[in-house]
Image: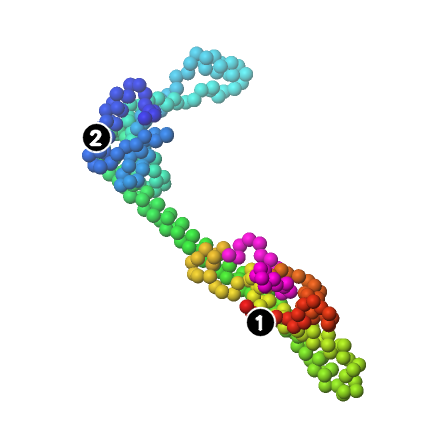
Amino acid sequence: MPLRIAPASIKRAIEVFSQFVFIAEAQGYRTEAMENGLALIVDEESIAFSLEEKSQKVPHEPTAAELKEWNRRASLGYASRPWPNYDYAPSGRLAIIIDANAYSGLRRTYADGKTRTLENMLPEVFAGFAEHAAMKKERRRAEEARARAWREAEAQRLRRAAFEAREKRRMEFVDAVHEQLIERAKLSSVLSHLENMAAEDACRVGAMVAWMRRRLLQIDVLIGPRFLDISSRSAKVGFEEPCTGSDDEEERDLGYLPPIELEYWSIDEEKGLATATTRYDWIKESGLDGNQNSDRNAEPQTNSD
């Protein structure tokens, strides 16, 4: 135990500490050595404390060297004294100081007084330790409650943020589909206009009509259920809500998210593999370029597996 006690008071300090330990064990408490002192374990709470000797303030007696320095300074016109007014010396008064719950209003120092010694105050000392242990426990519970409330609030904030992020990406995906629907409506309108022309004029726009029909087929495949499913999974756009309280609910939208776009896919049915490709290559591969010699099926597969 580190002692801040003058040699003249060490014997009594040991006697006080022995009595302290005896009473502590009788009350079900125990003392433990810490890195910088001692602790009393009360109701499983560790309360640090120290046994010290209080100092007292006594008038300073200047030394010969200090008096010589004073005379030298006085000869130079300096009036201040080169020594302190007081010194601090051991008082012989022992004290138990509790190092816990600062600024709590609880008593933390129990020392020899004018009429009572520290030995006679030990019952009050242990009552004080019990109060500090109760306050420390309550403060910890309150801190744990605050931390728990903060974690719950933070988790709720993350869930809400993740939900809004999912909704934003879902709408971006919907917007991409909607753009294709707008283009499809435009093509359908023009195609209807061309198909209603007189028979003698139809030959003039035959190639135009054929291209529009192919373009409509391309859009139908692009926004068909199979390609939409692949595109949404490729862009990490989920339309199912995760279970409440799951890690996915908070974390699935963290990290890199690819841009939202509808893509054309080259599908290897045997390997079950879909690879993003350009519209040009997909058209050639699918036989939708109007070339009858294409080595691929002319009709696109629009049904979902």
Q: Quadrant of residue 1?
A: top left
Residue position for label 2: 22
Q: Earlier in the sequence, mark 1 or mark 2?
A: 2
Badge 1 marks a residue whose secondary structure is loop
Q: Does the rendering let one see residue 204?
A: yes
Q: Residue at x 73, y 78 (%)?
A: 209
Q: Quadrant of residue 173?
A: bottom right
Callout 2: few (<14), some (14-19), or many (20+) C-alpha neighbours within 10 Å?
Answer: few
From this viewpoint, which residue is outermost toward the left? 26
**Given the image, on which type of amino acid does mark 2 rest?**
Phe
5 or 64: which is nearer to us? Answer: 5
Q: Residue at x 41, y 16 (%)?
A: 62
Residue 15 position within the rendered picture, expressed as x and y whole percent measured from the top left: 23, 24
303 or 137: which is nearer to us? Answer: 303
**Given the image, on which type of amino acid does mark 1 rest?**
Asn
Residue 85 position within the rendered picture, expressed as x and y whole percent measured from the top left: 41, 22
Residue 230 position within the rendered picture, expressed as x and y whole percent measured from the top left: 58, 64
In the rendered structure, does residue 223 fall within the stretch colored magenta?
no
Residue position for label 1: 303
The stretch of residues the image draws in magenta is 252-273
Q: Is residue 44 left or right of residue 35?
A: left
27 or 173: which is nearer to us? Answer: 173
Q: Residue at x 27, y 39 (%)?
A: 42
Of helix, strand and loop, which mostly describes the magenta segment? loop
Q: Is residue 183 left or right of residue 118?
A: right
